[in-house]
Image: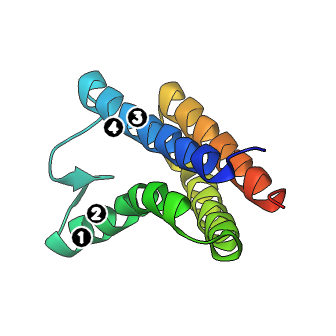
Amino acid sequence: MEDVPIKLSAIWIALMLTYLLGDVLRIFSGDFKAGEIGGMAVTPLMYLGMAILMVIPIVMVVLSLMLNQPVNRWANIIVAVFFFLFNLVGLPTYPSAYDKFLIIVGLVFNVLTVWVAWNWS
């Protein structure tokens, strides 16, 4: 018997590491300017929004291991679809090839999450 919660948790960890790799490469490549996004000053409220957005995959690692099957299945599907759409909309805004590549990798992880959760019987 497959242990689906562990698979789902592992996919969320892989997604987080992909996002983190993109952030690190952005800093080292010089594509990042502290305190700005797209030439706009980042406000404390924007930082809070980013923190909330980026803590969701971290929470999903834990929830994937703790929630019962029906709730777990739908939570993973809903959150993965949200991140898929969010990143798909944002994909054209990234100028660097490495960023586009990593976003596409993240999209694949989102699809894999939905597939694993959907096929969980």
Mark 1 → mark 3, Cα distance in angstroms: 20 Å
Residue 23 is marked as 4
Q: In the rendered structure, which amino acid carries the disc numbered 4?
A: Asp
| Residue 74 % position (x, y) | 69, 72
Is residue 109 toward the left or the right of residue 15 in the image?
Answer: right
Q: Check disc 1 and report the residue beneath it.
A: 48
Local secondary structure at mark 1: helix
Coloring scheme used: rainbow
Q: Check disc 2 and report the residue beneath it.
A: 51
Q: In the rendered structure, which amino acid carries the disc numbered 3?
A: Gly
Residue 62: quarter of image: bottom left
Q: Residue at x 61, y 59 (%)?
A: 89
Local secondary structure at mark 2: helix
Number of the front mark, 4 or 2: 2
Q: Mark 3 and 2 residues: CB-CB less than 8 Å, in contact?
A: no
**Precedes in sequence: disc 1 or disc 3:** 3
Q: Check disc 3 and report the residue beneath it.
A: 22
